[in-house]
Structures are given as C-alpha cells and as structure tokens.
Amino acid sequence: MRTLPVPQVPWKALLAVLSLCLALPLQAQAQTQSKTQTKTKARKPKPQPQKPKPPEKEEAPSEKPQSVVQAEERAQAKSRMRVGVGLELFKENSHLAGSQSINASRTDESFDYSSATFLSATLSLSIPAPILAERARIGGAVRLFGNYSASGNRQFGFGLLSQAFITGEYGLPVADKTEVMFGGRVGMSLLVPDRELSQEIDRLQVQGVGVWSVPRVGWLGGLSLGGRRKMSERIHLRADLSAQLDKTYLFATNETIEGLEFSKSWSTSALRFGFTVGAEFSL
C-alpha cells in the first residue's frame, strides 16, 4: 500500500497569519476611537458669555422689640447730664448767738429772728450715680438768697448770702413718667458782709480790734422729699419739700488791746423749711 505525502506548512507562515489576525481588530478599534474624538471636537459648542449675577439683597436688620427700645431710651435719658433751675419759698427759725467781753465785763448780744425775705433761687447740675445709675443721681448746686436780713423784734442786715452744696437723690417710680424723689445735701454757706454787719466790722476796726471785712463762711446739711415728672425726653418738672440746718460764723476773736482782754463771738443758726418748684433739662 502506497502512502500519500502530507504537505507540511512552514511554521513561519503560520506565525505570520496569526499576527495578521490579531493586528486587524486592534487597528479597526484605534481608527474608530480617532473618528469619535474628531467628531467630538468638531461638535464642541462655543463658550457663551456669562451673565452678571444680580446683586444679593441685603437682609433687613431685625427690628428690636418695643420693650427693648423703650428700655434703651430710658437708660439713655437717665445717663444724660442734667441742668436744673428752681425757685424756693422758705420759712426759717433763726438765732444769732453772740457776746462781747472786755476783761470781766460781758455783754450778751444774742437775739432770735426770721428772714425778711422768703424767696431763693437754685441752679443745679447732676449726673447718674456710679451705683444704681438708673435711679440715683449725684451733683452740685448753688443757691442764692440775695440780701439776707433779720426781721422781727430786731432789724439787722447781714449781707449777701449764697450757698454751695453737693446733692444726692434717689427716684422711686410710682406711676407712668412719675417718680418720688428722696434727697440729701451737704455743703457750705458764704456771707458777704453788708449793712449793719458791715457797720459793726467798721466800728470794731476803729477801736483797734483785728477783724477783717472778708466773707464769712459756714456749713449746711438738709433732706428733701418730692416728686418729678417726665414731660419729654429732655425736660422734667419737679417739686420738693425740704428741711435744712445751717450755721454761719461771723466773729471769733480774742485779743489784748491796750492792756484790756477783748473777745467777741457771733454765729447764726437757722432751721429752714422750703417748698421748691423747678425744671431739669437733659443735655
């Protein structure tokens, strides 16, 4: 039996066919991706100009409650400096304690009196106190009496009387815009000699006594009770009852004149009751 010859395929040709089969799909895939990218670039839209954004609306500040606003207004009003003016009607019980001695001879020159005038004017300035500032205030005041003279059993002119003192007060609310005021004062008085007092000084100087024609000083202290009502943000009206004690020193000399022992002592004491009406203005 004759055997037929089997054709032998060279191995190199087999490798070439396999390589060709693998290369064809890869090349087709690469061409497809290239075309896709080209189309995408061609279809890319042009950038459009951006529209400006409208400005953001500012949020309106939240309104404060009415109670908070009123509390702030009250605190602001109380924190202001105030200038006050007042007119006082007063009545006093006064006494001049006086004596003059030459050696063993002593003369009592004392007498009781009341003021010949009944009006005085006051100018004051106040600020909130360091503590309890919402209700308490401190300040100072000047009070002018004008020509101060005695009336009654003995007429005697002392001169121009004025007082300067510091004040403190506490306001207790009792009704709408109304307060009850509790106050106190302490200070000094100043008397410029005139009329009969000035004549007495001149007489002593002629006799060689070492007295000077200078203002006389004293002290004072008092209490007050009253009411104050708020009329507007800057104006308050008030009325007060007061009681005040003051003492003024007129003479206090003790010396030897031509061998004689001379001494003279004069001072006035007054208990004064007053009713004051006035107004305060916030700055």
Image: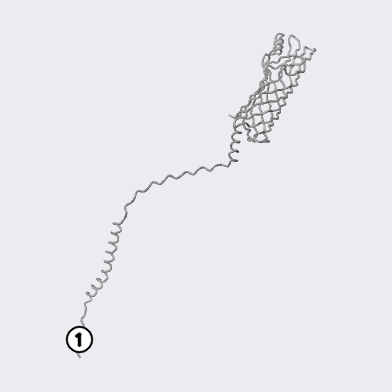
Query: Is 105 placed left or right of 35 in the picture?
Result: right
- Give above or below for 283 relative to 22: above
The percent position of residue 121, horizontal first and vertical second, equals 66, 22
Quadrant housing the C terminus: top right
Name the residue: 32% across, 54% down. Answer: 45
Q: Nearer the viewer, residue 272 or 8?
A: 272
Q: Residues within 10 Å of mark 1 (few under 14, many from 20)?
A: few
Q: Which residue is mark 1?
A: 4
In the current view of this chain or complex, which residue is farthest to the bottom?
1
Q: Nearer the viewer, residue 67 or 196?
A: 67
Name the residue: 37% across, 47% down. Answer: 51
Query: In what element is the residue under mark 1?
Result: loop
Query: Is 58 placed left or right of 28 in the picture?
Result: right
Quadrant housing the N terminus: bottom left
Give the quadrant of residue 170. Answer: top right
Task: Name which residue type carries label 1.
Answer: Leu
Name the residue: 24% across, 73% down. Answer: 17
The percent position of residue 27, horizontal first and vertical second, equals 26, 66
